[in-house]
Amino acid sequence: MLTEARKAVPKDQQRSVPHARAQAAIPLWAMLAALSAVAAMSQAFRTVATLFASELQREFGASTQEIGLFAGAFHLSFAVAQIPIGVALDLFGPRRTVSAAFLLACAGSFLSVFAPNLPVLVASQVLIGIGCAPAFLGAIVFVTNRYPASQFARLSGLVLSFSGIGMLITGTPLAFVVETWSWRAGFLVLAILSAIVLAANVLLVSDERVEPGRERKRPGLLAAFAEIGPLLAQRHTLGILLLGGVSYAAFLTLRGLWAVPMLMDRHGFGLVVSGHIMLATSVAALLGPPVFGLLKPGNRGRRYWIVASAALCIVAFAALAGQSSSLVDVIAVVLLGFMTGYFILQYADVRAAYVEEVAGRAFAVFNTAIFLGVAVMQWLTGLVGSFAAAQDADPFTPVFVVIIVLLAAGIASFVLLPWPRGKGWER
């Protein structure tokens, strides 16, 4: 049997036959689940700042702006790593790329447990950000390579929904751990879960196609990077990136930095009660992606859905800025969790806007814009919030106004700048 398998595979690939035969017994859904678990851990790491903020201020004497730096370090390193990670995914595949990178996240999370000061903690966030860089990207590249294009939106929506489990972790469960023990115990829980997820990816995920003769021709390293320039120069890229840079950033800035402090300071909620609300928001974020993933509006119709969804997010942030009542604020936060589902339409828009040969790098460029946007927005809102607090004013209203302005600018860019065109795009 092994001899027949060797004959079916070219000589230069015969060394991978035992691994391929072992992986053939593992269904694609199990591999995708393992990759999605990395995305879930990434969601958990990027939303811990709101739970740890008060503890860090108390232990390290950190200012609001320094907490913003702590929260933004993950997203900045995550964003900077996107393009190299995208190239690595094309050249080496999800298993090796995700596993090698996520090892850094495990190291950073364990370092966080023992961080003696805020600079070390920020450095650990940089490691975690780089380690989580291929999280969702690895899963959607896997979907692109292994499944028909018609299933992209549905499966990507399921991946994004599954990744929302990470936000469930940083809701009530981690809030209980932090309140009962400390923020260090919270990081220890995340570190242990990360080690388990890393082991699952090493053991379950396969980089190679099992079918003989179906191997993709991969470009060289320099050629892979060289293809990014023409991709950025395409007429429709700027509009996609500008909206991408503010859409997810708006929600994640709220969920990861401002939601819990707002609920506690503005309405007097405790940490665990606020954790319950974050749990409800995370459940809504689990439901949104598969719901939006069921939409099949065509390429132009999808763009209208994206614009309408982003506009509804502006309405929700306007409600938060209005300081009307605790009920309105809770509803707005949970609604914004559900509206994360429209981000899957943005990924489908990217998938349709570029040829398949550069799909991995297109996703990487888009992810770079997203998480640079998150880092910038969290830093900017931290600056605005600190300034308002120094004037003895409510810090939350100006923060939400800044988010509204940036969202409106992103929508305008997406609508007014050139749209994709070409054969099949108008469908």
Image (spheres, helix red, strand yellow):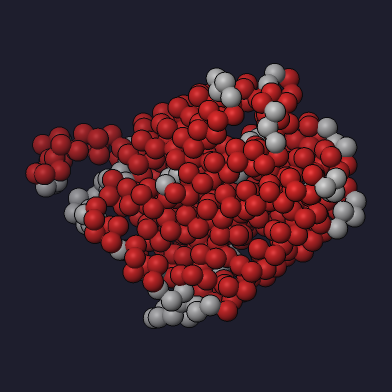
Q: Position of residue 304 (x, y in %)?
A: 61, 74
Whether residue 5 sits left or right of residue 227 in the image: it is: left
Quadrant containing the N terminus in the rendered view: top left
Q: Nearer the viewer, residue 293 or 43?
A: 43
Residue at position x 60%, y 37% from top? 70
One can see residue 49 in this view? yes
Residue at position x 64%, y 38% from top? 66
Q: Quadrant of residue 317?
A: bottom right
Q: Residue furthest right?
A: 325
Q: Is residue 422 above or below residue 75?
A: below
One can see residue 287 in this view? no
Residue at position x 55%, y 65% from top? 242
Q: Quadrant of residue 260?
A: top right
Q: Is residue 401 above or below residue 427?
A: above
Whether residue 127 sits left or right of residue 220 in the image: it is: right
Q: Position of residue 308 (x, y in %)?
A: 67, 70
Whether residue 70 sits left or right of residue 178 in the image: it is: left
Q: Position of residue 206 (x, y in %)?
A: 32, 41
Q: Nearer the viewer, residue 370 or 53?
A: 53
Q: How many marks?
A: 0
Q: Position of residue 396 (x, y in %)?
A: 79, 50
Whether residue 15 sits left or right of residue 363 in the image: it is: left
